[in-house]
Image: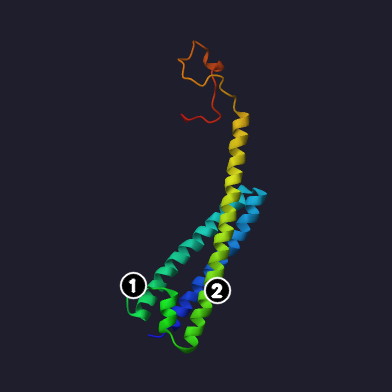
């Protein structure tokens, strides 16, 4: 079997990863602008790309097994070693492109994770500032206070 089918699948997979990278760049801007509705829509798109990548990855694994004739060590390096001529050059180019794209994705996802973490910390801090503070830290049986005067939570946990 030639590597042509495998190369075609790898090119599709690379394009999906590049599109996913573009979404992560958009997510960075959305996280900076704190637009929750746009973030929800973007996350739906992101999930579609992740599902498509997963399906195409399964196909690529089958093609790699057929190309290499074995089920272990299905790496790009192994494919490059087995390929010849222009197919080998194309696989080397794809490997380089994948590395660059994946590295960019990782860096942008790390930035997005930090932005989301900071946003959650800000929300938590704001909620803490809005909530009345307890004066006693030890557990005491509540006195015969009327219910209205007892501390109320911002969220109704019995709903």
Residue 49 place in picture, x, y as percent: 51, 63
Badge 2 local density, few (<14 within 10 Å), some, or many (20+)? some
Residue 17 place in picture, x, y as percent: 53, 67
Q: Mark 1 points at which residue?
A: 72
* SS label for mark 2: helix
Which residue is the extreme one toward the left?
70
When the figure is inspected, residue 89 is found, relative to residue 98, above or below; the finding is: below
Residue 93 place in picture, x, y as percent: 53, 79
Residue 50 place in picture, x, y as percent: 48, 62
The colour scheme used here is rainbow
Residue at (51, 84) in percent of width and height: 89
Badge 1 local density, few (<14 within 10 Å), some, or many (20+)? few
Quadrant, the N terminus? bottom left
* SS label for mark 1: loop
The answer to whether 88 appears left or right of 127 in the picture is left
Residue at (41, 85) in percent of width and height: 2
Q: Distance between the residues labelled 2 and 1?
A: 24 Å
Q: What label sits on residue 137 in the rendered view?
A: none
Q: How many labels does the image show?
A: 2
Q: Which of 31 and 157 is in front in this view?
A: 31
Which residue is the extreme one toward the bottom?
85
Q: What label sits on residue 97 in the rendered view?
A: 2
Q: Which of marks 2 and 1 is nearer the N terminus?
A: 1
Q: Give the image quarter of residue 6.
A: bottom left
Residue at (61, 50) in percent of width and height: 115
The answer to whether 55 appears left or right of 148 in the picture is left
Which residue is the extreme one toward the top?
144
Q: Give the image quarter of residue 64.
A: bottom left
């Amino acid at each position: 079997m030639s590597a042509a089918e495998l190369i075609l699948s790898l090119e599709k997979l690379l394009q999906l990863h590049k599109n996913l990278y573009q979404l992560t760049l958009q997510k960075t801007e959305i996280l900076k602008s704190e637009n929750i509705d746009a973030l929800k829509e973007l996350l739906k798109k992101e999930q579609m790309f992740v599902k498509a990548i997963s399906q195409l990855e399964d196909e690529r694994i089958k093609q790699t097994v057929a190309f290499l004739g074995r089920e272990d060590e299905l790496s790009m390096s192994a494919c490059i070693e087995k390929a010849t001529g222009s197919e080998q050059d194309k696989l080397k180019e794809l490997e380089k492109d994948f590395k660059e794209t994946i590295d960019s994705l990782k860096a942008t996802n790390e930035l997005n994770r930090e932005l989301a973490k900071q946003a959650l910390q800000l929300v938590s801090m704001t909620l803490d500032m809005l909530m009345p503070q307890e004066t006693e830290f030890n557990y005491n049986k509540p006195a015969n206070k009327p219910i209205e005067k007892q501390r109320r939570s911002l969220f109704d946990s019995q709903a």
